[in-house]
Amino acid sequence: MVGDRRRGQLLVGPAVIPCALGAGGIVCDKREGDGGSPRGRFRLRGGAYRPDHLGLRPPTALPLRATRPDDGWCDESRDRRYNRPIRLPAPGVSAESMWRDDGLYDVVIDLDYNRAPIRKGRGSAIFLHIARDGYRPTEGCVALARADLLRLLKRLGPRTHLRIG
């Protein structure tokens, strides 16, 4: 929708693919929990897929592994595992489950945001993943329709970058 800062377009050669962005729009000074998608150019580090929802590994040159029910992502900025994969349950630690029933993480690609070095409180779990119906806003990620993401994966590799902003 024109003028909606929570919606964007992914440009891939001549193709224009609609996407959802964070509820806070694109932000220059990302903070944990602000709902913004960070402005910048990010390498695609690889990701995961949910085998019981997709079956076979989606074709891509990116490293992908099968998600397991105990996979999580630490978003607790005081924890030494902040902005890294974690095993669940993790008592006393805030972490997002990567094994979601809503299908959003059936395919999830880790954007190289706040990863080297990891800065506490600057935002975690910035992914490329499947969009909610109607491209409702994310918590800061970039989200595509399932069919678009699966089709796009075939063109992505370790040298691919995603620019937000």
Image (cartoon, helix red, strand yellow):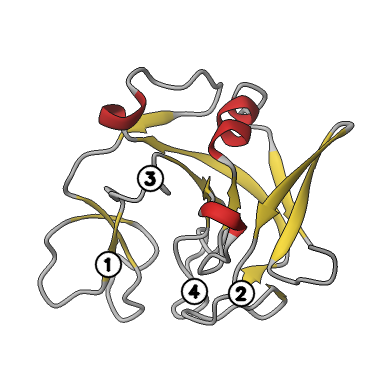
| Mark 2, residue position | 36
Residue type at mark 2?
A: Gly
Whichever of labels 4 and 2 marks the residue nearer the N terminus, that label is 2
Q: Which amino acid is tagged 1? A: Ala
| Residue furthest right as drawn | 14
Viewer-proximal residue among 120 and 146? 146
Left or right of 41: which side holds 100?
A: left
Disc 1: CA contacts within 10 A as few (<14), some (14-19) or many (>=20): many
Residue occupied by mark 3: 103
Return the mark for residue 119. 4
Q: Earlier in the sequence, mark 2 or mark 3?
A: 2
Q: Residue drawn 31% across and 76% down?
A: 76
Q: Quadrant of the C terminus?
A: bottom right
Q: Residues within 10 Å of mark 4 (few under 14, many from 20)?
A: few
Which residue sits at x=27%, y=75%? 79
Q: Is residue 163 above or below residue 32?
A: above
Q: Is residue 121 above or below residue 110?
A: below
Mark nearer the viewer, 2 or 3 = 3
